[in-house]
Image (tube, rainbow, N blue to C red):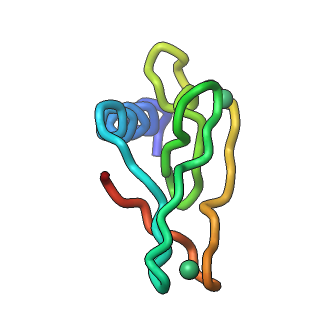
Amino acid sequence: MDAKSIMEEKISVYEKYKYKKFKLKCKKCGKIQDLPQHCGRDMIPFHDKLVCWMNLAPQFGGKNCGQAEIPFHHGERMEIIEV
Ligand SMILES: [Zn+2]
Ligand SMILES: [Zn+2]
């Protein structure tokens, strides 16, 4: 993918998560927990990782701030659910 389409993808993911609230949920036991935060906001799932919203926000144009693995519970990667 070229830089332009990567940026477009980032912006579309950012827009999707911008106005809604999401949490993490265990697929096995149903435990629900908050998404980790970075730079004052919930991190956003992007390509099987959680990234800082600044990495996706168009005004920061592909800044590389924080990144984290999606947490595991009961041996499986937790699901991201809208709340
Ligand atoms: Zn669990
Ligand atoms: Zn950050």
Residue positioned 35% across, 31% down in the render = 18
Residue positioned 49% across, 51% down in the render = 45
Residue positioned 54% across, 61% down in the render = 48
Quadrant in which ligand 2 is drawn = top right
Number of marks in picture: 0
Q: In this view, does 48 lie to the left or right of 80?
A: right
Query: Where in the figure is residue 49, as x and y percent of width and height?
Result: 59, 55
Q: Please name whichever residue, 63 or 72, is drawn nearer the observer in this view of the structure.
A: 72
Query: Where in the figure is residue 52, as x and y percent of width and height?
Result: 59, 35
Residue positioned 42% across, 60% down in the render = 80
Q: In this view, does 64 lie to the left or right of 1?
A: right
In the rendered view, tell whether residue 34 sits above or below residue 51: below
Query: Where in the figure is residue 56, as x and y percent of width and height?
Result: 49, 31
In the rendered view, tell whether residue 79 sits above or below residue 41: below
Residue at the extreme top of the image, as rendered: 59
Quadrant position of residue 82: bottom left
